[in-house]
Each structure stands twice: as C-alpha cells, then as structure tokens.
Amino acid sequence: MENILIKIREAFLKALYPESENCPVCKNQLKDKGLPVCPDCLSKIDAINPPFCIKCGKPFFEGEHFNLCPDCRAKRHFFEKARSYGVYEGILKKLIHEFKYNKEKRLIKVLGEKLSEAYERSGFSGIDLIVPVPLYWKRQEQRGFNQSLLLAKELEKNTKIRVEEVLARVKSTEHQTSLPKSKREKNVKDAFEVRKNADIKGKNILLVDDVYTTGSTADECSKTLLSGGADMVYVITLARG
Ligand SMILES: [Zn+2]
Ligand SMILES: [Zn+2]
C-alpha cells in the first residue's frame, strides 16, 4: 500500500513540476534552481575517511588496521595509488546512475566537485596529465557521451592540469558490473591502446573513471600507459564499489 502511495505522489509531483525541476534522488522540488540535486540529498553523501588501503583506497571497517587490503596483498597493481570520493552505494550510486543512464547532464557540476575534492584529499602531486578511461566507440555512440571524459574536464577546470584522451578502447567489452569478479580481468585484457601521436613519455598520469570496482579496468589502463612510456599512473574515481 505504501508503495502505491509513493508512486502516486511521484506521479503527482511529476505532473506538477517538470522533471528538470525536481531532485533526481528524492524527487522533491528543487528550491535552488542552480543546483541539480537538493542540498539535503547532497549532504548525505559521505566521503571515504581513513583507515583505508594505502594502495587502492578500499575503506577498512572500524578497528581494522592494515596498510594493504587482502586484494592488494595478493596482487600487484600497475597503478601507484587509487582513491575515490565515496562508497558506491546510496545517493552517490543513484547520482552516477542518473548521470550515466538517464543522461542527467546537469549533475556533472556536482559530481565534478566531488571528484575534485577526492583529488585534493588524495595528496597526489606532480601530475602532468589527466587521462579519462575511454569507452568503446559503439558504446559512446549509444550513450552520446563518455562520463569519464566529462568528469576529467571538470577536474581540469578545477586543477588546471590538462586532459588528453591518449587512450583508446580497441575492444568491445561487457559491462564490468555484470560480470563475476573472476571474469573481469579477462574481460578488459588488451582492451586499450595508447593513441598514435600521444606523447606520454616520462609523464605522471592521473587516470579518471566514475567507479572503481575490482580495479581491473584501472590496472589494464595503467599497464597500457606504462608500456607506452608513462612514468607513473595514479587513479581517481568518484566511487568505490
Ligand atoms: Zn533530494
Ligand atoms: Zn587495496
């Protein structure tokens, strides 16, 4: 019964106010039209705080005091360090979904700010270049945009470090989220290439993606960049799966 009432209320709100004037998370009407999500929802997104894995940034439960998470102890990553703004759940997950799949492009400002905050908190320094994780051309055509590139552009505005699309996705891969952990590494193997004429020799690169899950994509991109001559690769994502 309660569900029906919520649906009726949503339908009413939708009829009363065009979608663009409602918070994409709670559907309440936005008072501040300049902000694409209500301040209430925005304030509920928590940043990842220590303790976390010093390598991949995975948050530890309270009372756990390791340097490395089990995953990083078992396996060597190609990137130096990875950090994310928050955990991939709740409102942050919802916002990323709205942004990617419902093409709520207004959210880019808010998400870009979160990504910039994650970068500031990361303490990464000496970065020469920001590189977005590319999409396969067909997927980019379907979606109409590459979310990682849009995020990277926001970071460029805030950090003044330039973005260059030096990576290309040369293999159509399945959505990592739809695959079991064991298959993700294989799925992205040899999926990337450094574009011809890209100059990454000796550069410290900041790789940007929306979500870090098992790290397979970040690792494969890092491996490709390092074999193309990059010096070091750091990874920054909005969320951590
Ligand atoms: Zn809201
Ligand atoms: Zn780790």
Image: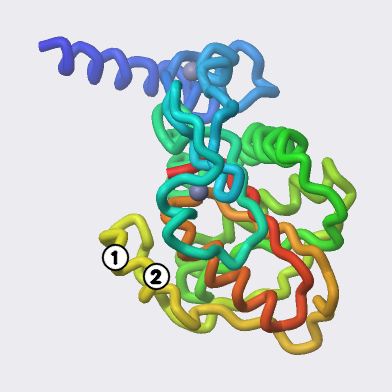
Q: Residue at x 76, y 63 (%)?
A: 205
* Residue 1, x across and y down, in percent: 10, 11
* Residue 237, x across and y down, in percent: 59, 47
Q: Closer to the camera, 150 or 32?
A: 150
* Gap between marks 1 and 2 measured at Cα: 7 Å
Q: Quarter-wise, where is residue 145 in the image?
A: bottom right
Q: Residue at x 50, y 74 (%)?
A: 136
Q: Quarter-wise, where is residue 28 in the image?
A: top left
Amino acid identity at mark 1: Ser
Going by the image, does 176 lie left or right of 23?
left
Task: Please state, as top left, top right, bottom left or bottom right, where the C terminus lies in the image.
Answer: top left
The colour scheme applied to this rendered structure is rainbow
Q: Which residue is mark 2?
A: 185
Q: Residue at x 59, y 41 (%)?
A: 84
Instruction: Assess whether mark 2 and mark 1 are in contact (beta carbons under 8 angstroms).
Output: yes
Which mark is on residue 182? 1
Amino acid identity at mark 2: Glu
Which mark is on residue 42? none
* Residue 93, x across and y down, in percent: 44, 36
* Residue 134, x across and y down, in percent: 59, 68
Q: Residue at x 42, y 78 (%)?
A: 172
Q: Is residue 202 above or below residue 206?
A: below
Going by the image, does 227 lie left or right of 212?
right
- What kind of element bears circle 2? helix
Q: Taking the image as drawn, is residue 42 in sight?
A: yes
